[in-house]
Image (cartoon, rainbow, N blue to C red):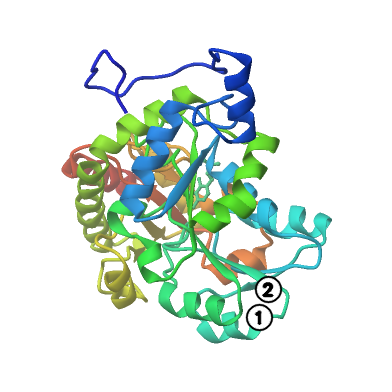
């Protein structure tokens, strides 16, 4: 979408409102009889450009951008679900998604069942007549567990429910869940889509009917809308998404192989390593293993903290998908609120570290990890 200036870089329309030539035109736009923007809570040209490009990348009919990934998740649930409805979700998911499902949805009379995402029998057994949505994240945070999207999509379809996939870890470059039967795809654009750790954002990709029947009026009236400035950052970042994801995958694979050779490392989890428990499924669904590697060091929490304290190049941060490599100790940060039993179920052990491999030279990252593991 170009302005008459014929700019090569997409324009940033940092505006809240739009002027009308005449009151008749305003009336027509409010009635939906004339095309055009009315207010940036409902829509904005820069935001539209970002949404259209995300839809093209995912192969989705339509997209709506939101202020954050969590705004996208929450809007998806609350726009469509009502009292008495039921949700089935894979246990291994982003902490805030679990909070929304377990703490917020029940206040509106929406119940849920959490299942082991890798056990298809559990998905089928959890279905009830009132089940309206199935929610999963693949690969999951932090242990990179893979869920068979085709199998879960069939269960959703047979039960008259929609399958929602959180695609933040893979991005549309590595995985397009709609090709496997997902009805709705959600992104935290904050992660790899921005890719440089600057701006929050989220995206919901869906079919026309979901947008028209649920999402459109929910976003318009409740306001989880993205700032045009943040949408512009994400839009510009899409130009390098493919290149960046390839580089993240290549570096992460190198770092994962390196870690697997280290004597203080007891376990490495990376979807494209043959020793990943769901390696074949990962290869069937993804075009690359992604940028995140999880690994377990000797000595539990103390061992993991020693590694963290000794790292020089790799920063300690719970964010991921940045050009800078970031490491976190899930037990004490992202998964701190879970009970020890829930953590054990997900494989979040005391010695586990999650490394988001950035775009630095992988040899430098391996050197940093080697000296930190030696110091520990
Ligand atoms: C970060 C993240 C979210 C939440 O996104 P925000 O942009 O931080 O609100 C949701 N799901 C996954 C898998 C994430 O990594």
| Placement of the N terminus among the 4 image quadrants | top left
Q: Nearer the viewer, residue 98 or 167?
A: 167
Percent x, y of residue 155: 54, 80
Q: Which residue is mark 2?
A: 131
Q: Nearer the viewer, residue 54 or 198?
A: 54
Q: Which residue is mark 1?
A: 126
Instruction: Give the structural element (helix, strand or loop) at label 2.
Output: strand
At 63% from the left and 40% from the top, the residue drawn is: 219
Tell me if I can see residue 56 in this picture.
yes
At 64% from the left and 52% from the top, the residue drawn is: 214
At 39% from the left and 36% from the top, the residue drawn is: 50
Q: Is mark 2 within 8 Å of ligand 1?
A: no
Percent x, y of residue 2: 29, 23
**Is residue 83 left or right of 285 when viewed as pictured?**
right
Q: Residues within 10 Å of mark 1 (few under 14, many from 20)?
A: some
Tell me if I can see residue 267 in this picture.
no
**Is residue 7 left or right of 304 when viewed as pictured?**
left
Q: Nearer the viewer, residue 3 or 302?
A: 3
Residue 148 higher or lower than 80, as above or below:
below
Q: Nearer the viewer, residue 229 or 217?
A: 217
Percent x, y of residue 314: 34, 37
Q: Are marks 2 and 1 in contact (CB under 8 Å)?
A: yes
How far is the residue under mark 2 from the one under mark 1?
9 Å
Residue 179 higher or lower than 63, as above or below:
below
Question: Based on the displayed image, in which of its 4 quarters is residue 132 positioned?
Answer: bottom right
Mark 2 or 1, nearer chain start: 1
- Furthest residue toward front: 24
Percent x, y of residue 363: 16, 44
At 46% from the left and 46% from the top, the residue drawn is: 63
Q: Is mark 1 within 8 Å of ligand 1?
A: no
Residue 318 higher or lower than 302, as above or below:
above
């Amino acid at each position: 979408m170009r302005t008459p200036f014929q700019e090569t870089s997409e324009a940033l329309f940092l505006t809240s409102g739009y002027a009308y030539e005449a009151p008749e035109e305003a009336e027509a736009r409010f009635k939906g009889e004339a095309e055009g923007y009315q207010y940036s809570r409902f829509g904005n040209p820069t935001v539209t450009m970002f949404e259209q490009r995300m839809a093209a990348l995912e192969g989705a009919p339509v997209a709506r951008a939101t202020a954050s990934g969590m705004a996208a998740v929450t809007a998806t649930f609350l726009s469509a679900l009502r009292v008495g409805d039921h949700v089935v979700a894979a246990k291994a998911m982003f902490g805030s998604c679990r909070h929304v499902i377990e703490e917020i949805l029940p206040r509106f009379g929406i119940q849920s069942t959490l299942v082991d995402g890798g056990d298809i029998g559990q998905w089928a057994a959890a279905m009830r007549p009132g089940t309206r949505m199935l929610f999963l994240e693949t690969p999951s945070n932090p242990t990179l567990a893979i869920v068979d999207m085709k199998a879960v999509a069939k269960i959703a379809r047979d039960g008259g429910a929609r399958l929602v996939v959180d695609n933040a870890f893979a991005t549309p470059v590595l995985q397009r869940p709609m090709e496997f039967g997902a009805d709705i795809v959600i992104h935290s654009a904050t992660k790899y889509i921005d890719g440089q750790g600057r701006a929050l954002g989220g995206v919901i990709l869906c079919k026309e009917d979901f947008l028209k029947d649920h999402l459109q009026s929910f976003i318009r009236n409740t306001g989880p809308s993205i700032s045009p400035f943040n949408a512009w950052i994400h839009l510009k970042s899409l130009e390098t998404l493919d290149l960046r994801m390839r580089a993240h995958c290549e570096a992460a694979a190198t770092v994962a192989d390196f870690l697997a050779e280290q004597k203080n490392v007891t376990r490495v989890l990376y979807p494209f390593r043959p020793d990943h428990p769901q390696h074949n499924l990962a290869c069937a669904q993804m075009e690359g293993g992604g940028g995140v590697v999880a690994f377990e060091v000797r000595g539990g929490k103390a061992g993991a903290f020693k590694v963290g304290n000794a790292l020089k190049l790799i920063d300690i941060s719970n964010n991921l998908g940045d050009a800078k490599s970031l490491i976190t100790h899930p037990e004490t940060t992202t998964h701190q609120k879970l009970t020890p039993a829930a953590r054990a179920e997900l494989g979040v052990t005391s010695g586990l570290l999650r490394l988001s491999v950035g775009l630095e030279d992988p040899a430098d990252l391996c050197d940093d990890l080697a000296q930190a593991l030696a110091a520990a």
